[in-house]
Amino acid sequence: MHQVAIIGAGQLGRRHLQGLVKSTQALTVHVVDPLEASRRAVADFIASPEAGPLPAIYVHESLAALPAELDVAIIATTANQRFAVIEQLAQAAKVRHLVLEKFLFNDSEQYERAASLIEARGMTAWVNTPRRHFGVYRELREQSRGDPLLHFTADGGDWGLCCNSVHFVDLVQFLAGETELRGLETRFDADVMASKREGYVELTGELSGEVGATRFTIRSIRGSAKPITVTLHYARQTVFIVEGEGKLWRVGQDGAGAETFRLPYQSEMTGAIADQLLSSDACDLTPYADSVAAHQPLLRAFAQYAGTVSGARAQCAIT
């Protein structure tokens, strides 16, 4: 019986729970949240007829109630809490696999401290930037081997760069087959906005840079209703993807064509990711070190505009 924990039972944590119960492995699931309202929401899910057959699920107020060993722990807290939770979890239990939500941390000093802790405790760590798990992008990467990706663009109207641009930088890393982010340039809109989550900030505007041989541009157009569109300029074809509509178009040497696809919800992915980790000690998500290579330059860029930078340390209230 595998022991699995979800730390943080807000909306995202509950989506993870809905996915986790679809695992094909024999699980005991532990959900930890100090807020009574969040624990009550988990209890309502457990009691719901729509939940279907469930593994054993235990709901705890603190990490101290967890078993001594965990096969997988998913940390679904906000960024300002995440490092402290990792520290506390490492004291409370021996963890094999750690799955972290993004934005990883909003203090640059915590990235190396977390890496040291993860290594010292013998954990593997993965970051939930799941586009590299999506079938449409996995198939595209396989189909395009030998056709260099020259330029990547993701743009749309009024979406938060601070919270979400790391998803697209991670996708560039995945498609380009490289990790290091170079030459990051920014053109942010004039004023800093309040995030949908209280106490956090957001930005619109544009980011650009390079990963390997691929140049990328990521743009949020303030005041626009344009759906997010991903455009991939390869040497021999161009691919247009509108994720929200599940549509893909190709234009290239072999003519033009259209395809449809469906993106999975988080509640459909977590069980599959857990199955991968439990059966093979690896999964489709981003390894921690690769994700840090995307997070740290982005954090510094955001902090220079909407936070504080002091020497090598950058801090910005993003999640």
Image: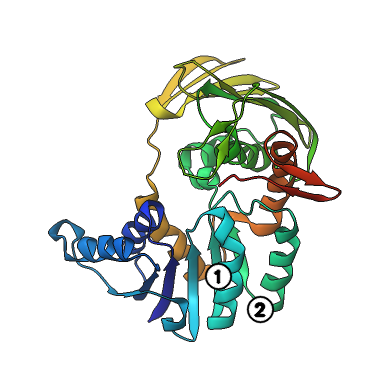
Residue at label 1? Answer: 97
Residue drawn at 20 percent across, 67 percent down: 53
Question: The disc labelled 2 sits on which kind of residue?
Answer: Arg
Q: Which of 140 and 53 is in front in this view?
A: 53
Tell me the element at label 2.
loop
Percent from the top left, x then y, of residue 63?
A: 46, 77
Is the residue 195 above or below the residue 110 in the image?
above
Q: Which SS class for mark 1?
A: strand
Foreground disc of the pair 2, 1: 2
Kindly give the residue lying farthest to the left in the view shown: 49
Camera sees residue 246: no
Q: Residue 207 appears at what percent x and percent y?
A: 69, 28
Q: Residue furthest bottom?
A: 68
Q: Quadrant of the N terminus?
A: bottom left
Q: Where is residue 246 in the image (x, y as percent from the top left)?
A: 39, 28
Q: Mark 2 points at which residue?
A: 121
